[in-house]
Amino acid sequence: MYKKNIYEVKSNRRIAEDVYRMVLAGDTSYLTEPGQFVNIQLSGLYLRRPISVCDWDGETITIIYKVVGTGTAMMAAMTGGEKLDLLTGLGNGFDTDFTRLLPGQGILKKEDGTYSWPDGRSVKAAVIGGGVGVPPLYALAKKLKKEGAEVVAVLGFNEEKQIFGYKDFADLGIPVCIATLDGSVGVKGFVTDALKNIDFDFYFTCGPEPMLRAVHRLGKERGVEGLLSFEARMGCGFGACMGCSCETIAGTKRICVDGPVMKSGEVIL
Amino acid sequence: MDMRVSLSGWTLDNPVIPASGTYGFGYEFAQFYDINILGSIALKGTTKDARYGNPLPRIAECREGLINAIGLQNPGVEKVISEELPRLRTVFKKKSIANVSGFSVEDYVYTASQFDQQEDIGILEINISCPNVHGGGMAFGQKPEAAAEVCAAVKKACRKPVYMKLSPNVTSITEIAKACEEAGADGIVLINTLLGMRIEPRTGKPIVSTGAAGFSGPAVKPIAVRMVYQVYETVKCPIIGVGGIATADDVIEMMSAGATAVEVGAANLVDPYACKNIIEELPVKMEAYGIERLSDIIGRAHV
Ligand SMILES: Cc1cc2nc3c(=O)[nH]c(=O)nc-3n(C[C@H](O)[C@H](O)[C@H](O)COP(=O)(O)OP(=O)(O)OC[C@H]3O[C@@H](n4cnc5c(N)ncnc54)[C@H](O)[C@@H]3O)c2cc1C
Ligand SMILES: Cc1cc2nc3c(=O)[nH]c(=O)nc-3n(C[C@H](O)[C@H](O)[C@H](O)COP(=O)(O)O)c2cc1C
Ligand code: FES
């Protein structure tokens, strides 16, 4: 279910070059899964701006966004106290039920809500993010961890001054591996270079399309499935305009309502 | 206060109808509010066969509007009737308006005839004005003879009222409207989107995949109002006014120009409650302007 509501900007801080973390206060009851997004109205701009939910609790929604144009620049100038009109609860987020994600492999769901292999081993999950594709993976990593998965985060950036989120993931007790294109921090290259020596049973990824394509290919080579989160220029964000439709193996899907998260076995990349 | 209007013998509770392509098949909006408050719903443009539409990106923003290059994505008339209409029926108890598109006269007749047999379709809206497909759509709406040919053929094959949805991308809108009326059209719907383009300053390339695409939203309202005004002076059949409507004042303006009912397009995308807000605001504005019966104001701009 979706909801349109007014939210108040509680804080808005710069966390890396051109990247800001904004906390919004208001109704969060329509958010159900990590990977969902909100669609933000900004005064004077005709279309809303879709931004992923990074994290939420009973009263606040946290988003992390990069300034790339008029709308995000307007957001970056906010200092707190502003009222914003948001659609929330949009999109199908990341499913974390490994009995569904790894069907027919005997995954067990225990009474405490955690998952494991039949022999009791934890499920190894890689969360792979590139740039502003990293934010939705935070709430996801938290949930996976709570549900007993052994999580590793692999985050890719262009260069050192663009890095954010390292500490957030590390504070969850998750090993974090950074890849930078210029090699200024961590592994030099793409997230797929960082993934070379990392072994996982399933992956979750969000980032620019070339990265999604590379991760998808790597998964295929290793015979590992995953969930990928996509972006598109959107008219509405809730399924009405067909502005975001893409072709998949399972037919035409709207990224806004049938996605943004899609299965690796379904997407055409 | 009386908001009812009548389209070819069908009485609507109010003149507010979401425009084709901006309201899906209705049920997405039922998540936001009870859609039975609407006058009716114009369904997503439907063709004989399923269509994926154009490649992404399909959407570009502009000041007070947007450009869309959807390209008539739809599952085809058979699936619309077997899957979408039943789903809409669970949340919407009124009749809707079928929006029919095609690539040949035979296509139009085939698709329109399928909808003609559906009890919960009130009007057949024949879209001869889609700017986003080649070899069809708008091509039929740019020549009076071609528009009349589609209209006459559909009219001959169907019993329900036939409304022709016209393109503003023409030299004389009145000539086309007149040709349609003479060919038997029961009503005229205008306008569909204008042909527009946005170019990304960084890359210097058009933003949407088709380059030029359909431009609509508040920015086009004066054009729509002018065209409705001109067509009102040319035809006797009812007109449904479309283009940039977002408020109750816009509805009153469009009806004053000569529209019997209105369709709300782009506004639904940016505010899913747009139609609801307009319907709730209408009585307030009627009261303020001393309008007792909304149907009284149709065409009052004309002397
Ligand atoms: C589901 C989803 C989740 C997203 N999550 C995030 C996030 O968590 N953090 C973040 O920084 N960005 C995110 N984005 C991208 C973000 O929506 C764009 O960066 C933003 O809309 C740019 O707006 P602007 O006004 O600054 O740019 P402008 O270029 O001025 O915008 C003009 C138009 O193009 C659209 N547009 C431009 N770039 C994009 C893009 N990459 N994707 C979609 N629409 C675009 C805008 O929405 C607007 O309609 C997400 C996009 C989608 C679809
Ligand atoms: C995303 C989008 C999709 C549309 N699809 C259709 C369509 O399938 N058939 C049609 O007749 N008109 C279609 N239109 C045109 C609208 O129905 C309407 O005529 C036009 O947008 C002008 O109204 P507006 O300014 O309120 O948007 C579409 C418009 C938009 C914005
Ligand atoms: S953005 Fe409108 S259907 Fe997805």
Image (spheres, coloured by chain):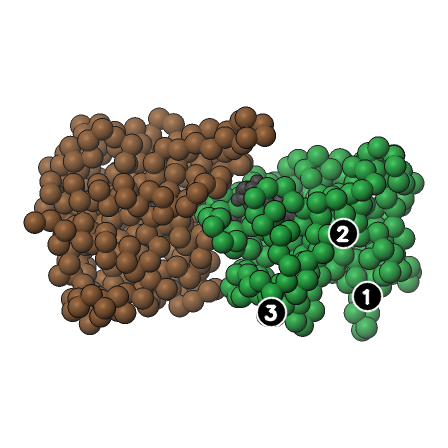
Chain colours: A green, B brown
Q: Name the residue rendered at 73%, 52% in the picture.
A: A14
Q: Amino acid at mark 1?
A: Lys
- Protein chain holding label 3: A
Distance from label 2 to label 1 (Cα)? 26 Å
Distance from label 1 to label 3 (Cα)? 25 Å
Q: Nearer the viewer, mark 1 or mark 3?
A: 3
Classify mark 3: helix, strand or loop: loop
Classify mark 2: helix, strand or loop: strand
Query: Which one is nearer the viewer's eye here, B66 or A136?
Result: B66
Q: Nearer the viewer, mark 2 or mark 3?
A: 2
On the image, numbered disc 2 is attached to which residue?
Answer: A15
Q: Name the residue rendered at 74%, 60% in the picture.
A: A139
| Earlier-in-chain disc, 1 versus 3 | 3
Q: Nearer the viewer, mark 2 or mark 1?
A: 2
Classify mark 1: helix, strand or loop: helix
On the image, numbered disc 1 is attached to which residue?
Answer: A146
- Protein chain holding label 1: A
Res A120 quadrant in image: bottom right
Task: Kindly indicate whether the residues beneath marks 2 and 1 are on one polypeptide chain.
Answer: yes
Please say if B188 is above or below A144.
Answer: above
Q: Name the residue rendered at 90%, 53% in the picture.
A: A175
Residue A146 appears in view:
yes
Q: Give the percent coordinates (x, y) of residue A33.
A: 67, 61
Res B65 quadrant in image: top left
Q: Amino acid at mark 3?
A: Gly
Task: Kindly indicate whether the residues beneath marks 2 and 3 are on one polypeptide chain.
Answer: yes
The answer to whether the residue labelled 1 contacts the one labelled 3, judged by CB atoms less than 8 Å apart, is no
- Protein chain holding label 2: A
Q: Give the percent coordinates (x, y) of residue B165.
A: 26, 41
On the image, numbered disc 3 is attached to which residue?
Answer: A26
